[in-house]
Image (cartoon, helix red, strand yellow):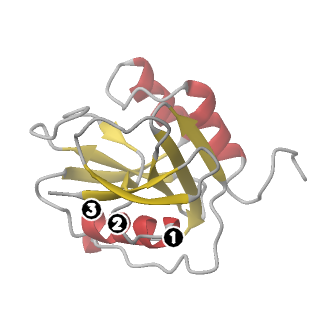
Amino acid sequence: MELWDTYDKERIKTGNTMVRGESFPQGEYHMSVHVCLFNKEGQVLIQHRQSTKSGWPDLWDLTAGGSATTGDSSQKAAERELSEELGISISLEHVRPHLTINFGNGFDDVYLVEKDVDLNELVFQEEEVHDARWASLEEILDLLHKEKFVPYFESFIHLIFESRSQYGMIRLD
């Protein structure tokens, strides 16, 4: 049983918790996170989800992601998901998410991190991840168009590539 903290619309903890899969109480939300790990060549590490995974089985996805559990900060949840799914340890202690995307039942903090990782050193979470590889923007868009990638908005994929090395919505280069 996975427990989540709930938050109000201003992102303040309510002091309540809920069990994953239960209906959301009116006016309460939960936090999820994504980490997009880029290498120095500007490719993002993508993972192939297991065919037995509920929710987008057998599709490619961003580096790592999931729900924050009770007591997690956004940073700790992102660190945990990356470690659990791919065996990659990083510290996000003093890092703000590059983006926060609101969705019906909560908000999703997106971290864009540059780190070269040897694919041979990855340790997959067997029940969730089948494979991983580096991919360019064009390769991800191709997978998306072929319905082999989790169905993110194409504009979101462009945004993470364009904003990976800076904060804000104004290009500085």
Q: Could you say where residue 64 lies in the image, as x and y percent from the top left?
A: 38, 55
Residue shown at the point (47%, 29%) measured from the top left? 152
Going by the numbered disc 2, the residue's amino acid type is Thr
- The part of the image, by quadrant, that contains residue 143 is top left
Q: Is residue 99 visible?
A: yes
Q: Is residue 57 left or right of residue 39?
A: left
Looking at the picture, does residue 39 appear above or below residue 19? below
Residue 173, given in percent of the width and then of the height, sits at 90, 52
Callout 3 environment at 10 Å: few (<14), some (14 to 19), or many (20+)? many
Find disc 2 in the rendering and name its residue: 70
Is 128 displayed left or right of 118 in the figure?
A: left
Q: Residue placed at 72% from the left, 49% from the top?
A: 163
Residue drawn at the location 71% of the way across and 44% of the way down? 162
Quarter of the rendering occupied by the N terminus: bottom left
- Element type at mark 2: loop
Which disc number belongs to residue 85? Answer: 3
